[in-house]
Image (cartoon, rainbow, N blue to C red):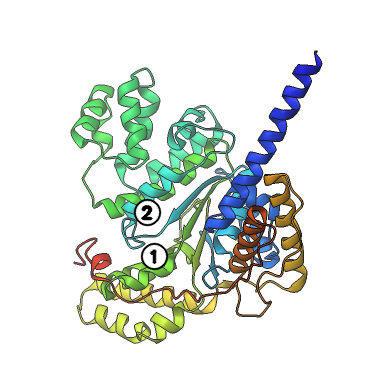
């Protein structure tokens, strides 16, 4: 190997390291940490990490043919102020989950993906799903790993056929998937259906008739919301029998439910109860959920807007069994928000010093210089980690451009608007 080629490879490696360092800095500037930034800085939120490890280990050790299933869905709620590092912790937990062979979906709650809409959340979760070690579309990668001769698959299929609560389109589609493996277009339609698309009942019945199975399945159209709820469980089980340890779903910025109408908030509180408390199924759903919210949600919405009282009253006034059940679930969800969140710890001096040195090193690598020590922000309890990080990076950026500059960073408070917004309330018809 010639000297020129060696130098070229060294330059290429240096460029690669610089690009990685600059990507990390850019992610930290924007407050949307990428995997490189998170794994470089890691986290000191040890109680959150420990609890998450307990959750994924509980799911990891389950098997589809085990009689030791615990009837629960595992979930945890993280709470912290704006810029306290919730997104950073979520990304760190996401990386941990993938390292432990879990499929991971990160969904940001928004106007387009409202928490009370199961179908919207499911579609977003499938679009965002990442399968460990694979780059393709998640649902197709999961489907390719199914072994129809495995004990796990046989036991799951037998359970599906005995379960009258699940949508029969899911049961029939799994059997048809095995039967028509050679028909790529039809099989693709089935897999797309699992991933959130619609499918024609007429087409399903036609194929069932061809196979001689039509009388075994009573296929009816159901509300997309109910079908999506079944799909969460169905896909989680498919993930398990495809050889992965389970499904981790992360729902970020759930505080935006404060912008919904009162009835939509009620439905969202019920969904929070579902995600954190789970539903009883046998076998248990191999799914772990992590939700985030701001630390002042209870004061701003549950107490400040008196949702504790107004939400149940609104539902019970309708005097129907459906709304009475919703009132119970919504009250449970509100109680969970106030009772069990894992609060992100404020950074102490040791963490700030360590993070400062790490970012200083990254900045040096990104721009090939020796950054001087800087003051950054005054260390007071009200400042968030994101504010410290942004101040350090901004000051080093300025000094890199002009070493004679005297930076002086200041903090401006960012208030999150949790008031009702008519645009959010119009996303779907309350009734």
Is residue 165 in view from this perspective?
A: no
Residue located at (24% from left, 34% from top) = 215
* Residue wearing tag 2: 121
Density class for disc 1 (Cα within 10 Å; few <14, some 14-19, many ≥20) is: many
Image vertical order of residue 262 relative to residue 127, above or below = below
Q: Give the mark, 1 or 2, whose residue is nearer the N terminus.
A: 2
Left or right: where 12 falls relative to 304: right
Residue 3: quarter of image: top right
Indicate the secondary structure of the residue bearing disc 1.
helix
Density class for disc 2 (Cα within 10 Å; few <14, some 14-19, many ≥20) is: many
Residue 12: quarter of image: top right
Q: Nearer the viewer, residue 101 or 327?
A: 101
Q: x, y (%) of residue 231?
A: 38, 47
Q: Nearer the viewer, residue 93 or 412?
A: 412
Residue located at (50% from left, 30% from top) = 146
Q: x, y (%) of residue 311?
A: 31, 80
* Residue wearing tag 1: 271
Q: Are marks 1 and 2 in contact (CB under 8 Å)?
A: yes
Q: x, y (%) of residue 362?
A: 70, 50
Left or right: where 214 falls relative to 37: left
Left or right: where 349 falls relative to 54: right
Is residue 28 in view from this perspective?
A: yes
């Amino acid at each position: 190997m010639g000297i020129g080629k060696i130098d070229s490879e060294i330059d290429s490696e240096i460029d690669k390291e610089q690009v990685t360092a600059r990507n990390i800095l850019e992610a930290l500037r924007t407050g949307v940490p990428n995997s490189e930034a998170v794994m470089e800085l890691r986290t000191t939120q040890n109680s959150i990490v420990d609890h998450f490890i307990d959750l994924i280990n509980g799911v990891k050790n389950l098997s589809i043919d085990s009689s030791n299933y615990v009837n629960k869905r595992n979930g945890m709620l993280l709470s912290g102020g704006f810029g306290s590092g919730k997104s950073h912790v979520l990304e760190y937990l996401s990386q941990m989950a993938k390292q432990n062979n879990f499929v991971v979906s990160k969904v940001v709650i928004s106007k387009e993906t409202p928490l009370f809409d199961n179908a919207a959340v499911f579609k977003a979760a499938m679009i965002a799903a990442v399968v460990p070690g694979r780059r393709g579309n998640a649902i197709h990668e999961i489907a390719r790993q199914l072994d129809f001769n495995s004990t796990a698959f046989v036991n799951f299929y037998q359970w599906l056929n005995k379960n009258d609560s699940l949508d029969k389109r899911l049961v029939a589609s799994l059997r048809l998937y095995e039967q028509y493996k050679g028909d790529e277009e039809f099989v693709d339609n089935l897999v797309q259906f699992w991933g959130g698309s619609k499918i024609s009942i007429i087409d399903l019945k036609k194929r069932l008739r061809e196979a001689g199975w039509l009388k075994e399945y009573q296929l009816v159209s159901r509300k997309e919301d109910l079908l999506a709820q079944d799909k969460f469980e169905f896909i989680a089980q498919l993930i398990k029998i495809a050889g992965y340890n389970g499904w981790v779903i992360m729902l970020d910025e759930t505080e935006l439910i404060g912008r919904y109408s009162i009835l939509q908030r009620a439905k969202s509180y019920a969904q929070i109860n579902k995600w954190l408390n789970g539903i009883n199924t046998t076998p248990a759903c191999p799914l772990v959920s992590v939700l985030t919210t701001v630390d002042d949600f209870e004061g701003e919405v549950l107490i400040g807007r008196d949702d504790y009282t107004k939400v149940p009253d609104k539902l019970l006034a309708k005097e129907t069994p459906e709304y009475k059940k919703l009132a119970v679930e919504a009250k449970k969800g509100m109680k969970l928000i106030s009772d069990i969140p894992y609060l992100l710890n404020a950074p102490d001096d040791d963490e700030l010093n360590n993070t400062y040195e790490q970012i200083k090193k990254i900045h040096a690598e990104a721009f090939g210089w020796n950054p001087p020590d800087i003051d950054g922000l005054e260390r007071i309890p009200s400042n968030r980690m994101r504010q410290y990080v942004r101040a350090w990076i901004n000051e080093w950026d300025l000094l890199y451009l002009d070493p004679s500059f005297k930076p002086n960073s200041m903090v401006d408070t960012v208030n999150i608007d949790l008031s009702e917004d008519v645009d959010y309330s119009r996303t779907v018809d309350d009734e």
